[in-house]
Amino acid sequence: MTGVRWGLLLDIALKHISRRRRQTLVAVSGVAVGVGFFLAVSALMVGSQNDFIRQLIDAAPHIIVSDELRSRPPQPGVRAVPGGVAALRGYKVRTEVRGLKGWPAILAMANAIPGGLGSPSLTGGITLRLGGREEALSIVGVEPDIESKISTIEDNLRVGHLRDLESVQGGIIVGEDLAERLGIGVGDIIAATSASGATRSLRIVGLFKRGQSQLGPSFGYMLLREAQSLLGRPFIINRIGIRLSDPYEAQQVAAGIEARFGYKAESWQERSADILSLLVTRNVIMYSVVSAILLVASFGIYTVVSNSVADKRRDIAILRSIGFSELDLQLIFVTEGLILAVVGVLSGWLLGYGLMAILTSLKFPIAGEIEHLPLDRGVRQYAIAAGASLVAGAIAAWLPARKAARVDPVDILRGAA
């Protein structure tokens, strides 16, 4: 089709639209409102999801290597005679000391990964005693300089710093809830007893903020060597946290570590599998709802083009009689729908931008701090809204256009005469 013919079809479509200004305005407004609210809702939902995943990734190391095994190792007799007919019963399982064997090699492998960093730690349980009250506490012995680089513990402290563990002998960081239950604060001393019977005094050097679920209400942090001494496990660690430059490679790296050393290496994706599956379901529901908004908005285009077809039946017959093909007529009315959709999309982008600006300005007090709504203002949402609106508008215009192109010009002109 030549450029002149395209120009003629476009000119006819514009004239049809300009002569039905009220219906045109209603159709454009419908698309604009649909696109605007699509952008606002999707920006809010996607932004909150991205913020949640970011917190999920940053809250803990991307990979946690623990002194657990996925499956029980086979007995020596089974390894010696694989597939043998002998059955082993009544054997006594050897008690093994828990901890990561050969952990320096695991740590070296983690640090050898480009952008990777591993942090050794020891976890165990102790009992805090003060004034006749007792509280169970799970302690984590860490190296403060390394741990602060692989997790967001430092950001979750209400009082104190992680490095204070190095400057205060017997220092420990606990949660605000635990401190309130025991009636203690920073600088106070409390007695601690481990499962091995070791007892010593600890000094509170920091407090975690309330509501930090990833840390747990009964977790405390100590210096690694002091935790090893209190738990009676010198030179032993039972966990290595690994942070990667690209967190989405965690699953692949964890599988490699587990295959080489045998210990359970759990990526953040594995730890949060249930949550991530719920987010997929949430996305399906979200896009279904906002797509329905755009679909409803396209009915305005369908109405405008249908009325245009009904009012222009005699003009259609004349165009057919002077040589316009069925395709030409379809293109005229589909072009009308696309023009309405394009104007509606541009207006909707402005409306959506304004709605997002309003949502961004809202402030919410959460846990004593002022928070803003996380929004995703990426180009992707604008492109999805535009693409869905243009497709819906083209289909809504094509349905009556197909009917218009199939009319018999002879019958129409004869009836008009």
Image (spheres, rainbow, N blue to C red):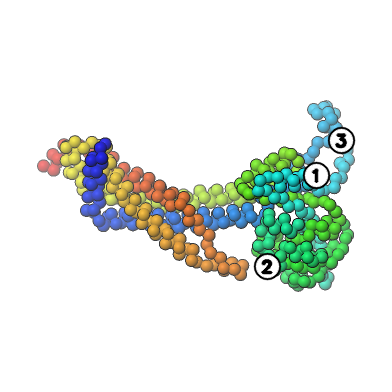
Q: Position of residue 227 (x, y in %)?
A: 81, 58
Q: Is residue 417 above or below residue 343?
A: above
Camera-near label (3 vs 1) is: 1
Tell whether 296 sits left or right of 131: left
Q: Position of residue 293 (x, y in %)?
A: 41, 53
Q: Secondary structure at mark 3?
A: loop
Q: Which residue extends farthest left?
A: 417
Residue type at tag 1:
Gly
Which picture quadrant has residue 90? Answer: top right
Q: Secondary structure at mark 2?
A: strand
Q: Which residue is mark 3?
A: 89
Instruction: Find the distance from the CA under tag 3 to the CA under tag 1.
Output: 31 Å
Q: Which residue is mark 1?
A: 102
Q: Which residue is mark 2?
A: 158
Residue type at tag 3:
Arg
Residue type at tag 2:
Arg
**Depth check: 306 or 110 in front?**
110
Q: Residues within 10 Å of mark 2 (few under 14, many from 20)?
A: some
Which picture quadrant has residue 138? Answer: bottom right
**Depth check: 246 or 52 in front?**
246
Q: Earlier in the sequence, mark 3 or mark 1?
A: 3
Tell me whether circle 2 and circle 1 mark residues in contact (CB < 8 Å).
Answer: no
Q: Residues within 10 Å of mark 1 (few under 14, many from 20)?
A: few
Residue shown at the point (61%, 56%) measured from the top left: 55
Q: Does the image show residue 125?
A: no
Residue shown at the point (27%, 44%) measured from the top left: 333
Q: Position of residue 399 (x, y in %)?
A: 31, 42
Q: Position of residue 131 (x, y in %)?
A: 82, 72
Q: Does the image show residue 148?
A: yes
Residue shown at the point (25%, 45%) measured from the top left: 10
In which quadrant is the N terminus drawn? Answer: top left
Question: How many callouts does the rendering have?
Answer: 3
